[in-house]
Amino acid sequence: MDNNVYAVDIIKKEEIWRFRTNGRIVDSSPKISNGIVYIGSFDGYLYAIDTASGNCLWRFKSGGEINTTPFILDNIIYFGSRDSYVYAINTDGKLLWRFKTGDAVVSSPVVYKGNLLIGSFDGYLYCLDAYTGREVWKFKTGGEIETDYTLLINNGVLYFASFDNYLYALDADRGKELWRFRTGKYGNCGIPSIHNGIIYYGSRDGIFYAIDAATGKELWRFQTEKEIIDKGPLIANKKIYFGAGDGNVYCLDMDGQEVWRFNANGSVYTSVIEHENYLYFGSWGCYLYCIAMDGKEVWRFATSTLQPAYLPPAFELWETRVKTESQSWEEKEEDKYSRSGVVIEFGEYKAKSEYTTKSEYTSRSEYK
C-alpha cells in the first residue's frame, strides 16, 4: 500500500529497484511477458514497466481504480476496472475493446478456448469473446464476485467463489452450474487449488476446506482463528501451505492435520510459493518472508510502508525478477505444485514452477 512495485533479488536478499505509482496497489499483482511487468494501480492506470531497469514504458488510463491481476495471451492484455469495464489492450497500450458490466470489476480474468471469463460486482460471471468483447453467456450468482487472482479451470470445469457464500463449479463452455458448495458467513473471495480430484479452498469463515471436485461434497475441514483470503493454497511435497488473517502460515498434511504454523506478525492474505525448497509470502506486517520447508524463518525483506498494509501475493512480487516463457499449464511432477506457472531465473539459479492443476487454458507469458 506504499504505492510501489518492488523487484527483490531473493538470492542476495536485497532490493533491485522500485517503481512508484500515484495510487495504492491492492490485489493487482504483476504479470510478466517479454521482459515487461504489467500491473494496475488505484490511480486508474495499468503500467508497463521494464523488468531490468524499473522504468515505465507506457501506461493506460481506465476510468476507475484497478485491483485486478492482468491476463496476457496472444499479445493482448486483459483486465478489469472499478469503472465497471473489462478492457482488452495490446502490448503497446492501445485499446482493442472494452465491455461494460453492471458494477465494478475487481475479479481477474482468464482466457479459455478463445473466451474470456471474468466476474463483476453485479454478481455475474461473464463469458466474452476474447478477440471482440462480444458476450457469449453470463451466469448469475447471489453476491459480488471479486476473485482477485486468475480463475481456476480444470477438465472443462470453472471453479470460482462469490460473496453469496458459495463456491461454484460451472461447465466452462456453456456456463451451466454443476454444483455449489456453501461455506460459512462473510462471503468468499479466495481462489481454490485442485490436486488429484480434490479442491482445496480457504474461506472468510476461517475454515480451510477439502472438497470433492466432481460432486462438491466436503471431505474434511481445518479451522483457523480468522478469515482466509487466499490466492490459492500451495500443494508441494505432499503438504498444503496457506496463510490466514490470524497472522499464521499453516502447513497441513493431505488429511488436513496440522504439521506446523509460522507466525508472520501480521495477516497473511497472499499465496505461499516454493522455490529451491524455500517458501515465500508477504504479510500485513510489511515484510516479504523466506522460510524453510520446516517452518523456520530464513530471512525477511521490509517494504517502506510504516503501518500494516496489504502486500500483493508473494509470488507476484517474486515474478518482478523472473523471465517468463511460453507454455501451457501442465502437471510435470506428481507431488510438486505451485501457482506461478513460469520458468524462474535468479542469476545462475533456475527452477520451473508447476501449476496446481492440469488446466485447459493456456498462458504464453506468462479486497479484504
Image (cartoon, rainbow, N blue to C red):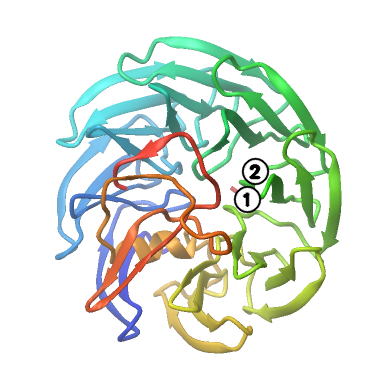
In the rendered image, residue 216, in percent from the top left (x then y), is placed at 79, 36
Q: Are marks 2 and 1 in contact (CB under 8 Å)?
A: yes
For residue 263, which numbered disc appears in the image? none
Relative to 286, say whether 309 is above or below.
above
In the rendered image, residue 17, in percent from the top left (x then y), is placed at 23, 71
Relative to 230, say whether 104 is above or below.
above
Of the image marks 2 and 1, the number of the one nearer the N terminus: 2
Q: Which residue is mark 2?
A: 189
Q: Is residue 334 left or right of residue 11?
A: right
Name the residue at 69% across, 72% down.
Answer: 251
Which callout, 2 or 1, points to the residue nearer the camera? 2
Callout 2 amino acid: Cys
Residue 230, quarter of picture: bottom right
Relative to 212, say whether 249 is above or below.
below
Distance of mark 2 from mark 1, alpha carbons? 8 Å
Name the residue at 41% across, 25% down.
Answer: 86
